[in-house]
């Protein structure tokens, strides 16, 4: 594996933060071509093309202002031209664009290319899990199939492009990563030892520490399901409960995540939940994230989630209530509500069918306590 | 197992909160004698005996004022009289009194009695782990012994009284438990299924939810080691790092806890770290606890831990720096410093040998990232 060519598909806040890392590692390790291509959706900023600004001033003035990009990161406005010769395609665009972008490059990428999804689940109209329900509704009886109808972003990319896809997740928000703060990330990669080692070299810097694990699905699902738990934590905060009640709620939420993953992807490794994508991302989301904040305000003010998204999140959507709704639909469909009382309660509370104060009642006879 | 007699050995804040629970469950379940004895170290409060106040007004006015104790909880000032007929002895006294109390009742308890330690590691001059070092120093070469010289509170009770001892730990501070807030606890019990079932009935109420696991040592060790991680979290806060850096530090701390437990008690169950005694207690301690608070102030003010204990904790000791010191001594003794860089760094920083800003440097090459 010599001189692997790298393309970053996306150039938003998170994509630009990652470009700062990959631009550095590809220079440091000789197995990479140090010229990194970054596909940039062309925009005109103050009369100049964004790609031109990036390629001359080495700064994404729109999405990551104030932070220099390495000079070896080259902005390319043409999607196919950016991807066609590369060995590693790093997808870091909002979820709703994944399908369209993949279809544009399908048939125009290198045989044996490897995909890496860094797609975070936020600010998008429908989450990954919406696909699960669609799949279920189209194919009733999937419950007994191995995967139970789940379709993840990595699978979406794989299905369209026919390439192996790894994922990178964890407690690492773009601003802190761009600031070179010490953070960790988890890469889920089912590939060979050689691929795992290559990915670690590609993403690990002094301040961005990588663990590579094999059960990629666990890594990816943790990222979606944590937001439901953060809603429960926010409801607990809104109700004025203390630290220990909140800790119990977070723990029970984590247990539901592990059970959900195990049901739909049997054989997940318990150790993976101890990685950055698991407990670390869950903790930050339950203490600092927007889902927590919105749900706390939901309880305290009685305003709707929609109203609060406008007033508290500047119109961005809180992913947790959406994901809770999709998961609740799914567990009802499979008759599994009793196994996931926290997931179900968060949906019922956010959609107004249940009083927030009922949350704790739903947890008293949690299957974890039986 | 009919009509088990219960004694609570201790009547402080935590003991009184537990008396409210056990007083209730022993009435609800017919396998218990509903008369619960509580050993109370006699004190004179406003000219009256504390035992007399408890037995007439059903309130521990000194240690849990404002909360009623069930009328079936009977305060007994004589230690032997309180313990001699009981089947279950619940130890809930400060650690420094354990040895003395056990010696007083040794030879005067029922054959086959079962002990439960609820001893929390705080406000005491020397922690559990001090015993580890002493044991090591007395018996060099213990490294290769199965237990590595560790001596826990439960083992101390067992060794003096010759009875089986379970432990109850978790994210459950006395004020929240006494307030009937929803909390969880973990019981570590190596005994029979019958004993485990009995203990669950004895401690579980609607708002105090119990899981019983077998590896009692893990349960007990988590309670001591979490305080070191909370110090690291506090140092991170003091340095002004963001949520993701803090999450990484907490996660790496948890990994060191699992490795430490596994080294000294091989065969621990990974699942136990997901219990209340594990992640839940760790989270509350790292976000709300006194060790976090003192270490944050230590970094921000430059004052010594001792000064801060006086000004911030009203003279109570922060257990984390003490435990870190003992653990660091131990891992140095065994040549294992490289495996526990966070534990070692917390000690070095708290004792002034290292600058707080060095913490992150110590974590970059953490064995978890290799």
Image (cartoon, coloured by chain):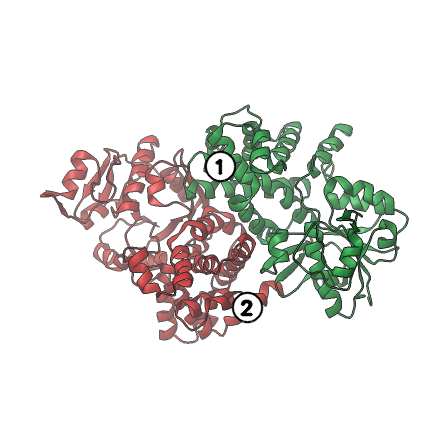
Chain colours: A green, B red
Residue closest to the eye, B343 or A94: A94
Q: Chain of mark 2?
A: B
Disc 1 is placed on an element classified as loop
* Residue with the mark numbered 2: B361
Q: Is residue A207 positioned above or below A281 on the image?
A: below
Residue in view at x 50 percent, y 51 percent = B273
Where residue A307 appears, as percent x and y from the top left, is 57, 29
Where residue B93 appears, as percent x and y from the top left, is 28, 52
Instruction: Name the quadrant containing residue A230.
Output: top right
Could you give the CA–CA distance between mark 1 and mark 2, rounded to whole angstroms? Answer: 44 Å
Task: Let me know if residue A144 appears in the view.
Answer: no
- Give the left or right position of residue A367, taking residue B206 as reference: right
Instruction: Name the quadrant containing residue B136.
Output: bottom left
Disc 2 is placed on an element classified as helix
Residue closest to the eye, B74 or A280: A280
* Residue with the mark numbered 1: A370
């Amino acid at each position: 594996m010599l001189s692997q060519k790298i393309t970053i598909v996306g150039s938003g806040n998170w994509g630009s933060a990652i470009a700062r890392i990959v631009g550095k590692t590809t220079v440091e390790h000789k197995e990479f071509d140090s010229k990194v291509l970054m596909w940039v959706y062309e925009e005109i900023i103050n009369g100049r093309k964004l790609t031109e600004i990036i390629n001359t001033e080495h700064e994404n003035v729109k999405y990551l202002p104030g932070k220099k990009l390495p000079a070896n990161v080259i902005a390319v406005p043409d999607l196919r031209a950016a991807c066609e010769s590369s060995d590693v395609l790093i997808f870091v665009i909002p979820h709703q664009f994944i399908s369209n972008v993949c279809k544009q490059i399908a048939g125009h990428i290198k045989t044996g290319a490897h995909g890496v999804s860094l797609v975070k689940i936020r600010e998008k109209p429908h989450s990954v899990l919406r696909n699960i329900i669609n799949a279920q509704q189209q194919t009733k009886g999937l419950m007994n199939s191995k995967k139970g109808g789940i379709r993840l972003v990595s699978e979406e990319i794989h299905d369209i492009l026919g390439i192996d896809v790894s994922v990178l997740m964890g407690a690492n928000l773009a601003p802190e990563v761009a600031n070179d703060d010490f953070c960790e990330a988890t890469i889920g990669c089912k590939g060979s030892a050689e691929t795992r080692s290559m990915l670690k070299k590609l993403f690990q810097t002094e301040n961005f520490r990588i663990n590579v694990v094999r059960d990629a699905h666990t890594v990816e699902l943790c990222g979606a399901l944590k937001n439901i738990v953060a809603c429960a934590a926010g409801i607990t905060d809104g109700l004025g409960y203390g630290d220990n009640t909140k800790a119990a709620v977070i723990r029970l939420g984590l247990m539901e995540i592990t059970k959900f993953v195990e049901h739909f992807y049997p054989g997940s490794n318990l150790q993976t939940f101890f990685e950055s994508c698991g407990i670390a991302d869950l903790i930050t989301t339950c203490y600092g994230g927007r889902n927590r904040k919105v749900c706390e305000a939901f309880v305290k003010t009685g305003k709707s989630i929609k109203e609060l998204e406008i007033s508290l999140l500047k119109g961005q959507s809180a992913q947790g209530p959406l994901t809770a709704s999709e998961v609740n639909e799914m567990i009802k469909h499979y008759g599994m509500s009793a196994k996931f009382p926290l997931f179900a309660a968060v949906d019922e509370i956010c959609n107004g069918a249940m009083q927030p104060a009922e949350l704790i009642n739903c947890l008293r006879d949690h299957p974890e306590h039986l």
